[in-house]
Structure formats: C-alpha cells, structure tokens
C-alpha cells in the first residue's frame, strides 16, 4: 500500500480550491444547507446510471471534479475527499459501530477527456483506494510533507454518498454538529425512500461567509449534472 501511494504522489498534486480565500486562523465551525435534488434530474440520473453502468456516487463526484477543474484552471489534477468503509472482508462487516475513514481521490485531467472517460477513471480510482486503504490519509500527508514540502490539506471538497435505507415509517432527519474539517462536504442520501435525493452540504463559515455563496455552488453542480445527462 505504501509503495502504491508514494508512486501515485511522486509529483505533488495540484491545488483544488473550492474558492479563493485568505484566512488568518483556522476554524472548523460550519453550517448546513439542505436541498432536494430536482425530481426531473433524479429521473434522468437513474436512467443514465442504468444505461451506462455508472453509480450515482460517481456521477456526483464527476460533477464536483468538473466544477473544481473549471475554477482551478492552473491545476492539471483535481483532488476530492471520499469516505471509505474500513471493512475489507465478511468478518469485518459483522463488527458493530462506525468504521469509516477519508481518503484523497486524485484525477489527472486533460482538455480532450470526455465525461465518460472521467467517470471510468473515477471508478478505477475507487477500486484502487479500497485496495490500498491501509495506508491512511495521515500517512499520505506525512509522505507529501517530507518529500514535496507540501503543506495544508489535499482537498477542499468532499462527497459522501450514502445508499443505506431506513426500515421504518418514521421520518428521519440528520442534524449537523456545527463543525466540519473540510470546507465543503456534500452528503447525498435517500434514507427514507423519497422520490429524490436529499443533499446536505456542510460548509465552513470562514470559507463561505454567506449562505448564498454555497447555494451558488450547489446550483452550478446541478447544472453540470444536467449537462452530463444531455450528453454535453
């Protein structure tokens, strides 16, 4: 696992800022915005996933990576964070409790790359990350700081797609604890089996001063998803 990650990051990854910022002190205080994915877009995404054998998680990650690439044109690569379920075999899957870590997903982009190619590349990255997850994000950061004089975090944005369903007639609501270690975290779920996905976005208030700034990012991501569904 160590050899894989050190080879992957033998060159320092480019910055993937969610927005320009200059912060004198670091704070993880955060707020949350909750949106419902438009029903027409949910329907189009379901058909797209079925036709092209793509998971909804990869679609949302693709949209975020495209957005970050557009606002960071000087970077050849884009890195986002993703959660990884640390249960590698049947025995570990029987263990109760929370077993999740976060890992960087880095994609090198080119002007000629199509959306389909990007989706496939993200899918391969998922498999590699799961296969080599024993070398933690902390280990990767330590390597980068020692070998590349790297500082800060590898990513500003994270996607967490949760496919678990509740088995109760009760309506559930997930409350934020008011903190986020990542400036922009998009949680997508449909636990209560509604017609469309619920999108919870946790954002650091020192990075996004106004809620409208976050709503703009969400609208841009929805627009990119719509363009992807239309083959653009």
Image (cartoon, helix red, strand yellow):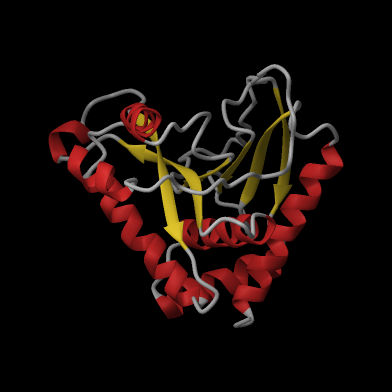
Q: In this view, does 207 lie above or below 228?
A: above
Q: Which of 158 and 150 is in front in this view?
A: 150
Q: Residue at the spot x=37%, y=34% of the render?
A: 144
> In which quadrant of the rendered image does the N terminus lie?
top left
61 w.r.t. 110: above or below: above
Residue 210 located left or right of residue 31: right
- Number of labelled discs? 0
Position in image of residue 112 (x %, y %): 51, 79
Q: Which residue is drawn at 73% across and 19% down?
A: 24
Residue for point 46% across, 45% down: 165
Visible residue check, residue 164: yes
Q: Which residue does the image show at 75% across and 26% down from the upper left?
A: 206
Would you say 39 lies left or right of 215 here?
left
Residue 124 horizontal/vertical position (percent):
32, 61
Question: Hey, which residue is sitting farthest bottom in the picture?
Answer: 231
Residue 120, image x, y percentages: 38, 69
- Residue 86 falls in image quadrant: top left
Residue toward you, 115 or 53: 115
Q: Is residue 1 visible?
A: no
Q: Going by the image, does 54 lie left or right of 80?
A: left
Q: What is the quadrant of the C terminus in the image? A: bottom right
> Closer to the camera, 153 or 144?
144
Q: Where residue 142 sits: x, y (%)?
A: 35, 26
């Amino acid at each position: 696992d160590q050899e894989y990650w050190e080879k992957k990051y033998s060159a320092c990854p480019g910055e993937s800022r969610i927005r320009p910022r200059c912060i004198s002190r670091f704070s993880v205080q955060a707020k949350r915005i909750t949106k419902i994915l438009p029903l027409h877009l949910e329907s189009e995404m379901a058909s797209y996933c079925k036709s092209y054998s793509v998971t909804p998680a990869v679609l949302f990650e693709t949209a975020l990576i495209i957005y970050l690439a557009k606002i960071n044109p000087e970077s050849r690569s884009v890195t986002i964070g993703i959660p990884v379920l640390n249960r590698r075999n049947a025995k570990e899957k029987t263990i109760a409790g929370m077993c999740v870590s976060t890992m960087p997903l880095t994609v090198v982009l080119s002007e000629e790359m199509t959306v389909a190619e990007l989706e496939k590349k993200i899918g391969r990255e998922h498999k590699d990350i799961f296969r080599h997850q024993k070398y933690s994000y902390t280990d990767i950061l330590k390597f980068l700081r020692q070998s590349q004089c790297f500082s800060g975090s590898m990513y500003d944005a994270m996607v967490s797609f949760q496919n678990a369903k509740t088995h109760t007639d009760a309506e559930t609501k997930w409350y934020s604890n008011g903190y986020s270690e990542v400036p922009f975290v998009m949680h997508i779920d449909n636990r209560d089996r509604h017609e469309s996905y619920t999108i919870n976005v946790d954002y650091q208030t020192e990075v996004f001063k106004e809620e409208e700034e976050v709503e703009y990012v969400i609208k841009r991501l929805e627009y990119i998803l719509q363009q992807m569904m239309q083959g653009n």
